[in-house]
Amino acid sequence: MAAHLTDLARTVLRRGRHSHQPDPFETLGIQLRLTRLAAEIRHLEHNDGRWARVHHLRAAQGAYDDVLAEACRLLAIPVQDAVAPVRRLLAETELRSRGWSW
């Protein structure tokens, strides 16, 4: 009986490792970072008085693009080789079509 339980446990663990479902907590963490970065970008776009605004905006957009790429890797979505705004739009569209929101 113990051998059967051991085999069952191995099978369950093996299936769990090969599952294509991402960890829900990792997914939530990425969505939270995307939310924060999107809010920062919106704030920077509407704040004309900030010193070095363009520098901060580019840094925030770069971080946002990096987190989008991380989300795409998590879901095995190929990242298109295009200029940043097009790549960003394609990644956002694909993630939203899979039920992601931020």
Image (cartoon, grey):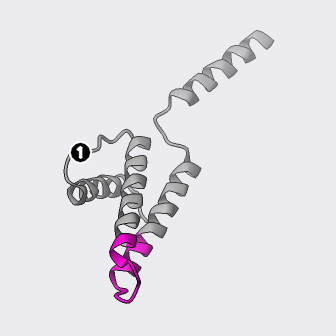
Q: In this orientation, which residue lies closer to the viewer: 50 or 72? A: 50
Q: Quadrant of the N terminus?
A: top right
Q: Where is residue 78 in the image (x, y as percent from the top left)?
A: 29, 40
66 versus 48 height, above or below: above
- Residue 18 percent coordinates (x, y): 51, 27
> Residue at (34%, 87%) from the top-left corner?
48
Give the residue type that dot 1 points to.
Gln
Name the dominant secondary structure of the magenta segment.
Answer: helix
On whether residue 48 falls in the magenta region, the answer is yes
Residue at the extreme front of the image, as rendered: 52
- Drawn side of residue 50 relative to residue 32, left or right: left
Above-or-below relation of 72 to 97: above
Residue at 37% x, 38% y: name it: 76
Q: What stretch is highlighted in magenta?
A: 38-56
Using the rendered image of the protein, determine whether residue 5 is visible from the camera's viewpoint.
Answer: yes
**Horizontal relation, residue 17 to residue 31: left or right:** right
Q: Position of residue 23 (x, y in %)?
A: 55, 44
Residue extending furthest toward the right: 2
Work out whether 53 lies above or below 16. Answer: below
Task: Name the secondary structure under disc 1.
Answer: loop
Q: Quadrant of residue 49?
A: bottom left
Magenta includes 5? no
Determine which residue is flagged by label 1. 80
